[in-house]
Amino acid sequence: MRIHLQSAAIVLCTYLTGCSIIPAAGPATSDISNGHGSETGKGNYNIEIVNLSPAVIQHQRAFRTAHTFSETLGTASRCGDTLGVGDALSVSVWEAPPATLFGGGEAGMSDVPAASRTTTLPDQVVDSAGNINVPFAGSIRAAGLTITALEGTIVKRLAGKAHEPQVLVRLTRNAAADVTVVGDVSSSTRMPLTPKCERLLDALAAAGGVRQPVDKITLQVTRGAGAYSMPLDSVIRDPRQNVPLRAGDVVTALYQPSSFMAFGATGKNEEIGFEGKGISLAQALARAGGLVDTRADARGVFVFRIEDSRELDDSSASSTAQGAAKKVPVVYHLDLKDPAGMFLAQQFEMNDKDTLYVSNSPVADIQKLANLFYTVVFPAVSVGTQFK
C-alpha cells in the first residue's frame, strides 16, 4: 500500500509540473524567451525579444539624442524682428530745412536743428493684408519686413515730395511675433518676441515659472505640425536644450510624474516613481529592492515596453518591427549572471510606464513543488500508512 501511495505522489508531482499550476508571480525565463511572435489573448502580438548588448544601448542613445530640442527645433536664432499683421507702429518723419511737406509739424528733439521739422503720425496697425498707410506715401507693405527695411521703403516713397526726409519707425505693440505659454505654470501668458531672441526658459520665467517640482515637469514645444517633448530638468542641466523660440510656438508645461512597475522576484512589487531626468535599469532594480536571492533567476531580468519601432536596433528587430508599425511590444532581456550585464544595466535607460520583471529560478519552483508535496501528498501517505 505504501509503495502505491508513493507512486501516486510521484505521478501527482509530474502532473502538477506538466500542467504548470505551481504558484508563480509570472512567466519563467524560458517562457518569455520562447514567446517571440506568440499569440496572446484575443489579438496577435508580435513580441520582440531583444537581448541587451552594447550595440542595442548605443542605438537607443543615438535615437534619443536625435530627438532632443537642440536637434529637432534647432539652435539658430530667428528673432522677432520682422513685422506682422496686428502690430502697431509709430511713424515719425523729419524734413530738412526748409520743410515743405510736413512743415506744419511739431518741433523735433533738441539735438535736431531748430529749422527742421518732425511729424509723428498716429499709430498705424498692420492690417489683414499686411499694409499700413502713410500720408503722401500711400499704402505700404509692412508685414514680413524688418523695421529698418520699412523705414527705407517709406523714405523712398517720400522722395521728391518731402525735403530730404528721414523716417523713424517704432514698434508700440507686438501682436504678431509672440509665444504662447500654457500648462502647469503660475500664469498662462503670451510672450512677445524681441530682437533679444528669447529662449525656452525665458518663456517659463515670463509665465511665473512652474507650479510643480522641476523633476516632475515635461516641457512640450509645438511648432507648426510637430510637437517635441523633453524633461524640464534635462533642459536646465544642458544649456544646448534651452533653444531659441520662434513666432507661433506653443510651450506647454506638463505635470507628468514618471514611474515603472516592478513584478516578480524583486524586493518590492509596486509602482515606483523616478525623476524626469530618468534612471538606469540598475537604479530601477535597486529601488525595487533588488533581486530576492532565494527565488530570483539572475538570468531572467526583463523590461516590458511599448516601443517606437525606429528605436529598435536593426540587427535585433524583426522585419515586422522595422516595417510600417509605429509602436511594437518589446521585451528587453538582461542576464545578470554575466558580469557584463552589470555594466549594461547601468547604461540602459528606463522609460515612463515600463514594467520590470524578474522571473523565478527553476530551483525555486522545485522548492514550491516540494512544499506542495509535503502539504498535500505527504498527509495522504501518512493516513494510508496508519490504515495498513
Image (cartoon, rainbow, N blue to C red):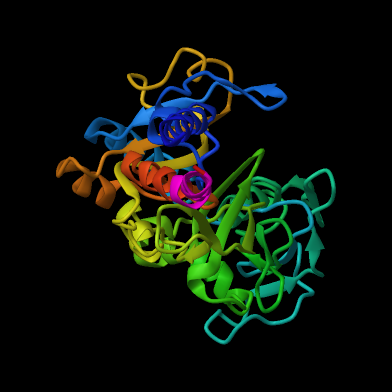
Q: Is residue 188 above or below residue 330?
A: below
Q: Residue drawn 55% across and 51% down?
A: 353
From which residue to which does the magenta span run?
Answer: 373-387
Q: Is residue 94 above or below residue 87?
A: below
Image-based side of 80 in relation to 74, left or right: right
| 42, 153: nearer the viewer | 42
Is residue 376 found inside the magenta-colored segment of the image?
A: yes
Image-based side of 117 in relation to 48, left or right: right
Q: How many marks?
A: 0
Image-based side of 166 in relation to 359, left or right: right
For residue 7, which quarter of the picture?
A: top left
> Residue lying farthest right?
128
Q: Is residue 56 above or below residue 37?
A: below
Residue 128 placed where, x, y %? Answer: 85, 47
Residue 273 placed where, x, y %? Answer: 50, 65
> Residue lying farthest top?
319
Q: Residue drawn 75% across and 46% down?
A: 140
Does residue 196 appear in the picture of this structure? no
| 327, 254: nearer the viewer | 327
Q: Residue drawn 47% across and 21% down?
A: 36
Residue 247 placed where, x, y %? Answer: 63, 53
Residue 144 placed where, x, y %? Answer: 65, 45
Is residue 341 found inside the magenta-colored segment of the image?
A: no
